[in-house]
Amino acid sequence: MAEISTTARTSNFNNGSPIINLAPDHLFTILLLLPIESILSFAMTCKKFRHLASSNSLWESICRRDWGPIAVDALKSSFHGDKDHQLLPWIRLYKQVSQLDSVCCYKLSDPDSDLLLPSPRASHSLDFVSGCLVVFGGGCEGGRHVDDTWAAYVGNNSRRMLKWQKIHSGIPSGRFGHTCVPIDNYLVLFGGINDRGNRHSDTWVGQVAFHENVGISLSWRLLDVGSIAPAPRGAHAACCISNRKMVIHGGIGWNGVRLGDTWVLELSENLCFGTWHEIVSHSSPPARSGHSLTCIGGTRTILFGGRGLGYDVLNDIWLLDVSEDYSKWVQIFYELQNIPAGVSLPRVGHSATCILGGRLLIHGGEDSQRHRKDDFWVLDISAISLESVEPARLSSERLLANMWRRLKAKGYKPKSRSFHRACVDNSGRYLYVYGGMVDGVVDPAESYGLGFDGELFLVELVLQL
């Protein structure tokens, strides 16, 4: 018996690890269950495994896993017909997205052209849905609201001048400081403020469609949400999670009171009705307005910045995880002095958009002295879990400091701005920025010399393919 056992051990030793005998398809499946660090370690074991772990098909599948199939298919479509990039180098693309250090800006609007353009505005909504950019509402000169809707089809040519189409619907009523988030081919709009100072608490659903012959259609309808709804407000923040849910937080309610509540709207499968319920968490973000709320995948949402109760401008980060069993806010602590140029991070009226790779691209905004910004920052919390950010468990200052990275900006230089809006296309590589408040010619009647902007520009993630 001992002799048989010794022979078996010798045979296993000569044949190497049992994993050597696994079929490549089985190894492929196992690798897709592992984190990136483990895949890279696996590639260092031998030539056979290095070849498998470096294959383009594996890394395309990893990109689908980590970025989502919609982003990967959109990237492939954007290079369709490009002879130099018929086969995208997915491992190199993954590395460059992880180490992104620059963006390039392109101007997409020309006020001197004969094309119809949306009028200058701020605190509006801008969304990418059904291959189109959709602008609704906002505020303009004299504190008046805007009640129009504009749409432009983008297609695969991201850098071209867009042809805007004004959509006549009459609803929803004019407002600014509302939120509008895309869900599939729909838009879900909530709240806002009109030029009489009235706050809204209505919820609207808009269906967007593009037709080759007739252009873009958008039909709005008031959503039935029953008797329970958040208090009327504007200047709040919102995002979509889990395909059929929308989260809102904070804003300005009646009498200018800043709010700190969190609500979730659960939509029916056909988006005919919805149900609001409030999230009550032991720890939650303080009341604020002009902040951002961005989904970074699944049920995880990041809140950043805004203006607090004492009119102070904030730079705190909060992570919200909404699941079937529980919903929990957790603050991510970090020190500004540990971040190069971190002193410029506190801001209100900025945009924070989830880009390719599940990171936040933060642009613009203003500080407590109303100095507007034109910078671009990436916020990456991919290495941080809910458990690791509990105050008692903070152990790595380096990890927290590396969350932030200021990007270099090339190409066209847009004006510094705040209360603009931004959205990404399906690939997550192209960010569209429209409108906002900019520094204008000082008018004695306007103490701050503010101007409303009507410029549209494109921000492209610089990837060397």
Image (cartoon, helix red, strand yellow):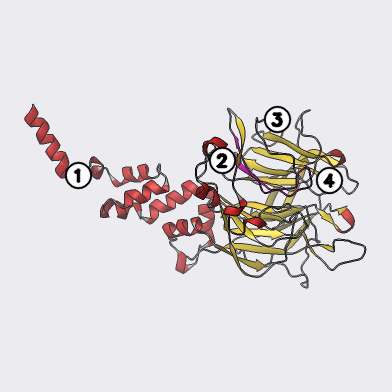
C-alpha separation, residue under disc 3 versus residue under disc 1: 57 Å
Mark 3 and mark 4 lie on one chain; the one further toward the N terminus is 4
Query: In percent of the image, x 67 and y 39: which residue is there?
Result: 246
Label 4 to label 1, Cα distance in Å?
70 Å
Mark sitting earlier along the chain (2/4): 4
The tag earlier along the polypeptide, 1 or 2, is: 1
Q: Earlier in the sequence, mark 2 or mark 3?
A: 3
Residue numbers of the magenta segment: 297-322
Amino acid type, residue under disc 3 in the picture: His
Neighbourhood count class around disc 2 (C-alpha, 10 Å): few under 14, some 14–19, many 20 upward: few
Task: Quickly name the residue at label 2.
Answer: 298
Mark 4 residue type: Ile
Q: Amino acid at mark 2?
A: Gly
Residue 375 has which mark?
none
Please name the amino acid that badge 1 sits on: Gly
Compute the Cα span from label 1 to label 2.
40 Å
Q: Which residue is mark 3?
A: 277
Furthest residue toward front = 337
> Distance between the Cα atoms at labels 2 and 3?
19 Å
In the rendered image, which residue does mark 1 sit on? 16
Res 456 → quadrant: bottom right
Residue labelled with disc 4: 193
> Where does residue 10 sit, x and y in percent of width and height?
12, 39
Query: In x, y percent, where is residue 242?
Result: 59, 38
Q: Is residue 279 above or below residue 362?
A: above
Residue appearing at x 37%, y 48% in the figure? 39
Is 61 one of the magenta-colored residues?
Answer: no
